[in-house]
Image (cartoon, rainbow, N blue to C red):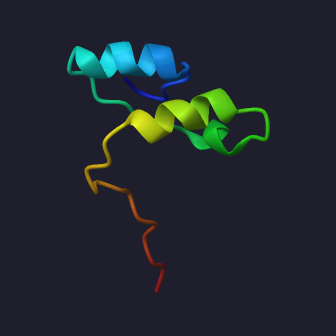
Amino acid sequence: MHCFSGDADVARRCLDRGAWLSFAGTVTFKNAQPLRDALALAPQDGCWWRPMRRT
């Protein structure tokens, strides 16, 4: 699910069904604790986009 914005309950139901979750910058907002709780449930596979270096 691209740019997941649900809470931990919705995240658990999605993960139980085999969904992959991605999170956007909204996870850093002060009022986004439910979203951070959902993020804590998601497995981290190490596939992170890294910024490209400009030379």
What's the residue at 43%, 70% (across, down)?
52
Residue 32 seen in this snapshot: yes
The image quarter in which residue 41 lies? top left
The answer to whether residue 41 is above or below residue 55 is: above
Horizontal placement of 54 versus 15: left or right? Answer: right
Q: Residue at x 33, y 16 (%)?
A: 14
Q: In the picture provided, is 32 more to the left or to the right than 13? A: right
Q: 7 or 4, which is in the foreground? A: 7
Q: How many marks?
A: 0
Q: Is residue 22 visible?
A: no
The furthest residue to the right: 30
Q: Position of residue 4 (x, y in %)?
A: 48, 25
- Residue nearer the viewer, 13 or 54: 13
Q: Quadrant of residue 25?
A: top right
Q: Quadrant of the N terminus?
A: top left
Q: Picture coordinates of residue 36 (x, y %)?
A: 58, 37
- Where is 45 relative to 4, above or below? below
Report the side of 25 relative to 20 (left or right): right
Q: Is residue 16 above or below residue 22?
A: above
- State the image quarter where residue 11 is shown: top left
Depth check, front residue: 23 or 38: 38
Q: Which residue is outermost to the bottom?
A: 55
Is 5 located above or below residue 43 in the figure? above
Q: Position of residue 33 (x, y in %)?
A: 68, 34
Towards the viewer: 13 or 19: 13
Position of residue 15 in the picture relative to residue 40 (left or right): left
Place of residue 31 in the rendered image (x, y in percent of width and height, measured from the top left): 78, 33
Q: Residue at x 20, y 21 (%)?
A: 18
